[in-house]
Amino acid sequence: MGIENYNVEDAIYMTVITIATVGFNEVQPLSSAGRMFTVGLILTSFGTFAYAISQITRYVVDGELEQYLYQYRVVRNISKLSGHTIICGYGRNGRQAVKTLLDHNETVVVVEKNPEMIARIKDEEKFLYFEGDASIDQTLLDAGLKNAKALITTLPNDADNLFVTLSARVLNPKIKIISRASEENSDSKLRHAGVSNVIMPDKVGGAHMAQLVVKPDVVEFMDILTGQAASKVHLEEIDSNDLPEEFLDQTIEALDIRKRFGANIIGFKTSSGNYQFNPPADAVLEANTKLFVLGDHDQIAEMKASFSL
């Protein structure tokens, strides 16, 4: 427009056919300055075009497009979830947490930013994962934090776990948060930030090994009950609020679990938070009481079906 005094329409038309190398005739003969401008336009546009093609090719070949499409599908699928568990970090503790939850048929979404861990997750393909930084609010929201029932943060750095906890507690005040901790003084800080339970793997592991020396059979028995060893025996936690209303304010005997299903109530947690082991048959089932039922998988499944749990 400046060199040849073209109007806007003619200038756009000439620019497009020049960049596209179509080769139509000029709207009007070009001056020497116009020809030199056209040469520069062709060279510049050719370089830009070649760069764009190389970037698109790299985007596809390097798998970035595939990863983008996967993340889009994951976010769409996660938006439909409710009551799932988010695992932040797929290190040793994270992998064990995922395995245990999957063994109990729980829905899991893993958040991980380490490329090596992401590659490992891709090989397994047993659960949904989201590639991103768990300390960023939007990442947690994309992982379905609003509808999740629990979040487990197993990041190696206590400060990162603390930051994730603060973000999660603000975004979802009701969610249950379980955090890994490495340092003794991190326990109180994490609890003040809103963590429901703090686990120190080194401390727990050392105590577990010591217990295997002092009372090995008891420890192995407890491992079986808690699902850490392969066994048909299953220990189930049942909220009294999920039971049919007619059982509330009734005795344990009224449930008749032993006779009906072959399972046993070995303990319960009262609404005030106190635990009672081997409760008597006349113990009353109040609201917000948790029952601990021991039985094999078939007995537990039959009981849940009967009570519509």
Image (cartoon, helix red, strand yellow):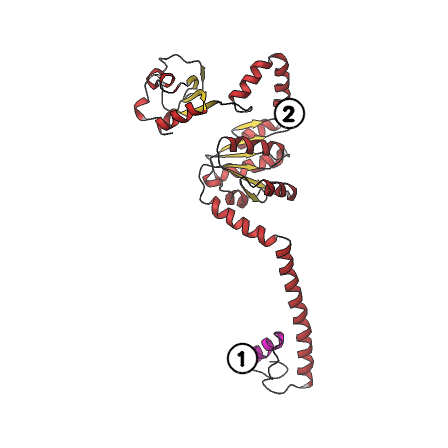
Query: Mark 2 = which residue?
Result: 202
Would residue 28 be counted in the magenta stretch? no
Task: Estimate the x, y position of residue 180 in percent, counting from the top left.
Answer: 59, 30
**Looking at the image, is 56 positioned above or below residue 46?**
above
**Residue 302 falls left or right of residue 32:** left
Q: In the figure, 35 relative to 142: above or below?
A: below
Task: Give the structural element (helix, strand or loop) at label 1.
Answer: helix
The foreground one among 180 and 169 is 180
Q: Mark 1 = which residue?
A: 9
Magenta span includes 10: yes
Q: Tell me which numbered mark, 1 or 2, is placed earlier along the sequence.
A: 1
User: What range is drawn magenta here?
Assistant: 1-23
Label 2, secondary structure: give it: helix
Mark 1 surroundings within 10 Å by alpha-carbon count, few (fewer than 14), some (14 through 19), many (20 or more): few
What is the x, y in percent for residue 147? 45, 40
Residue drawn at x 57%, y 17% as measured from the top left: 219
- Along the viewing direction, whichever of 284 and 63 lies nearer the viewer: 63
Can you tell which quarter of the image residue 297 is in? top left
